[in-house]
Amino acid sequence: HRSAMGNDCQCQDRCSQQQVEKVPVKDSAQEHRLTDGLTRGHEVETDSTGTPTVEPVANITSSDAPPYQTPLLPESLPTSEKSSPRSDSKLMVTVVGTLGLRNANWFPGTGKSDCYCVLRTMSDQQLHTTKIVNDTLDPMWNEEVEVEYVPGESLEFGIWDKDLVRNNFLGRAVLDIKDFESSGFTGELEVQNAGRGVEACLHVKVKHAGQDYPQGPPMQLTTVITKVPGKPVGVDLDITCGAAGFICGINDGAFAAYNKITSPEAQLNVGDYITKVNGVEGDGMALLERLKKDTVLEVTFQRPFIYIIAISRKHAKQPLGVNLSEIASGNSLLIKEVTEGPVQVWNSAHPALAVRPGDRIVAVGGKRGSAAELVKASKVGKQLQLVISRPTTSTTASYMPDL
């Protein structure tokens, strides 16, 4: 049920090795900024369960930049550090929330991380620290603050776990100046350095004084793509779900040619869902037929709604509690049914982000790859993160408050 369309429009097995492309946030910060809150002379890393593994590193020399201090919490900020205008500009920033953080409280019975976010410029000017949201891996702060900052600087959002002994670094996201200096920003940022096998995202909004927050990127688009006679459409499409086509690869052809002349926000990407072609919708085979036979294609596609779930199980061999499609191909696993098990436990605790039939698992424990590789990764470890994808709807798009 997955087709790669070439010159002869025959089904080919191309996308089993395709991987979803990840677009990292550009990182202009120095590496020493990531040692925030860690013991000097040691580098603390974590495995996929969040358990620290401590390894000695070389002594810091005069040529190494020293680690900065753990960000102060709101109640401990001296008045002089709460704002330090230097011919600054005013910004309104809303720190909405994060999905998919690791659990820094790795001792049994200690609960989950107590999370807060520190907003600063890349030159280390601290602008705001959010409240602490206790016992969660998906904190929702939804805090709006007016800040004064030096124009021309990118913004860094550091995410921390408040601990009695020492605050734990959970990751950081960077909003590049070019992405908000003209008209602001609304969207999600990849959380970098979140831990091995951890994928997390931070949702933020930024606007300049006197502006409105920009709308986020469109979640559904309709465009016209014209095929060149004798040339392939150039897409690997998984139609296992029966109602839409999941793009698991874009090859040389009409789709790639369209992307080259189209702005990034209107391009078709691996992981998108094709839901309608030339008036046909709701039938994957019929969509595929139109893509093969028609020369002029009016294509409607939806961006994926991506979220991360964290599950625990008694042992690595315990099933996840999902029945998958018998046709394991492409670069995702289609969920047919949720049964008793760790995923069902997640659903009970997170009804707004419950996994349901028709969802796709696109990464397991930080690993992406073919369906076979995802199945293999799911059989390792007692604690796992699963990255779930489904077509964006008005309901899923509004999950993040005010985003």
Image (tube, helix red, strand yellow):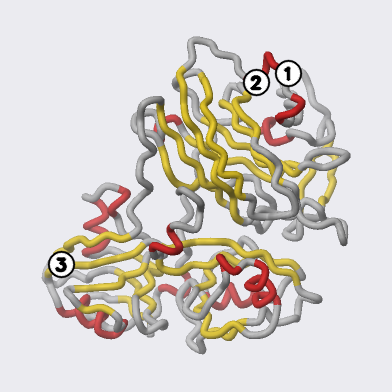
Q: Is residue 61 above or below residue 300?
A: above
Residue tagged by mark 2?
82
Per the model, the C-alpha gap separating discs 3 and 2 is 58 Å
Q: Is residue 133 above or below residue 31?
A: below
- Name which of mark 3 and mark 2 comes first in the sequence: 2
Give yes or no for contact between labels 1 and 2 (Cβ–Cβ under 8 Å).
yes
Kind of residue at badge 3: Lys
Question: In the image shown, does 384 or 354 lie closer to the viewer?
Answer: 354
Quarter of the image where one finds residue 245 = bottom left
Name the residue rendered at 50%, 18% in the picture: 150
> Badge 1: few (under 14), some or many (20 or more) residues near its Cα, within 10 Å?
few
- Across and down, in percent, residue 229 comes to 11, 70
Q: Is residue 401 above or below residue 306?
A: above
Q: Is residue 228 above or below residue 2?
A: above
- Residue most extreme to the top: 87
Name the residue rendered at 33%, 53% in the picture: 218
Question: Secondary structure beneath disc 3?
Answer: loop
Question: Secondary structure beneath disc 2?
Answer: helix
- Residue most extreme to the bottom: 326
> Badge 3: few (under 14), some or many (20 or more) residues near its Cα, within 10 Å?
many
Residue tagged by mark 1?
78
Q: How many marks?
A: 3
Per the model, the C-alpha gap separating discs 1 and 3 is 63 Å
Quarter of the image where one finds residue 337 = bottom right
Kind of residue at badge 2: Lys
Name the residue rendered at 81%, 37% in the picture: 57
Classify residue 311 as left or right of residue 234.
Answer: right
- Across and down, in percent, residue 73 comes to 73, 31
- Across and down, in percent, residue 348 comes to 66, 73
- Across and down, in percent, residue 68 comes to 73, 26
Question: In the image shown, does 363 or 108 lie closer to the viewer?
Answer: 108
Residue tagged by mark 3?
227
